[in-house]
Amino acid sequence: MTAITMNQVNKWFGALHVLRDIALTVNQGETVVVCGPSGSGKSTLIRTLNALEPIDQGALTVAGIRLDGAEARRQVRRRVGMVFQSFNLFTHLRVIDNLTLAPEGVLGLSRHAAEARALALLDRVGLADQARKFPGQLSGGQQQRVAITRTLMMEPEVLLFDEPTSALDPEMVHEVLHLMEALSREGRTMVCVTHEMGFARNVADRVVFMVSGSIVEQAPPDRFFDAPQSDAARTFMAQVLH
């Protein structure tokens, strides 16, 4: 089944045409990596998928909901989880409270049920012993894993990642990518904007390459990395794999 459908989607910021006739389908259980040079529209694309950025033209359907109004945006945001470059944790709240806030307030879970879910997920991501700490007491990699766990607390149908390792020190990148790989292998639907080409090659079902607001090519990772079809993709990979 289809989780995301973008049909001739266009987006402008003033005179700047940031998304140009985007046509993209993501199936349920598929992991798609979106890559390309800076300014290619990757982050804007992923932000349209949970209605953080409205589209100007075309049609966009996410988790069975066509994004065409305020109510649709609210429904999609309950079904789609987003992990950002920055962790966006509430620094004055303990980890456990960061995790339980939305499930209690939005999903209506009891405190007991929300804490039980949080502790189970923290155990799964190797952070069970960090539940009562504040974010500032954790490493960057641990904070990003908490941020991913917070997203999982809402049981989303689609997971979106916007450069989730770009703010991390190099030694902390692996632990976040390892968690993302585990989520992919569970069969979750994931769209990831990243420059981590090792992750793209080993984990993605498909790589989508963007330049100047357009999708230039998309292919399974072995074909994309071993035989890219466009000069732009060959140039990009020569730079990032140098």
Image (tube, helix red, strand yellow):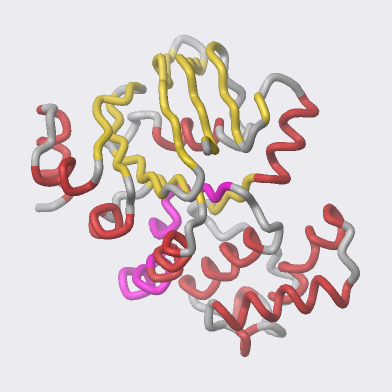
Whether residue 110 is situated above or below residue 87 in the rendered picture:
below
Whether residue 126 is situated above or below residue 150 in the rendered picture:
below
Residue 89 found in image quarter? bottom right
- Residue at 53% x, 69% y is 145
On the image, the x and y values in percent for residue 171 come to 32, 75
Whether residue 68 is situated above or below residue 135 in the rendered picture:
above
Q: Residue 155 vs residue 100: left or right?
A: left
On the image, the x and y values in percent for residue 187 come to 48, 57
* Residue 171 included in the magenta stretch of the image: yes
On the image, the x and y values in percent for residue 236 come to 16, 38
| Residue bounds of the magenta highlight | 158-177
Q: Residue 32 vs residue 60: left or right?
A: left
Q: Residue 160 vs residue 225: left or right?
A: right
* Residue 237 included in the magenta stretch of the image: no
- Residue at 62% x, 37% y is 63
Q: How many marks?
A: 0
Residue 130 found in image quarter? bottom right
- Residue at 35% x, 45% y is 33
Whether residue 103 is situated above or below residue 210 in the rendered picture:
below
On the image, the x and y values in percent for residue 199 come to 30, 58
View extreme (front): residue: 1
The answer to which of 40 and 113 lies nearer the viewer is 113
- Residue at 78% x, 68% y is 100
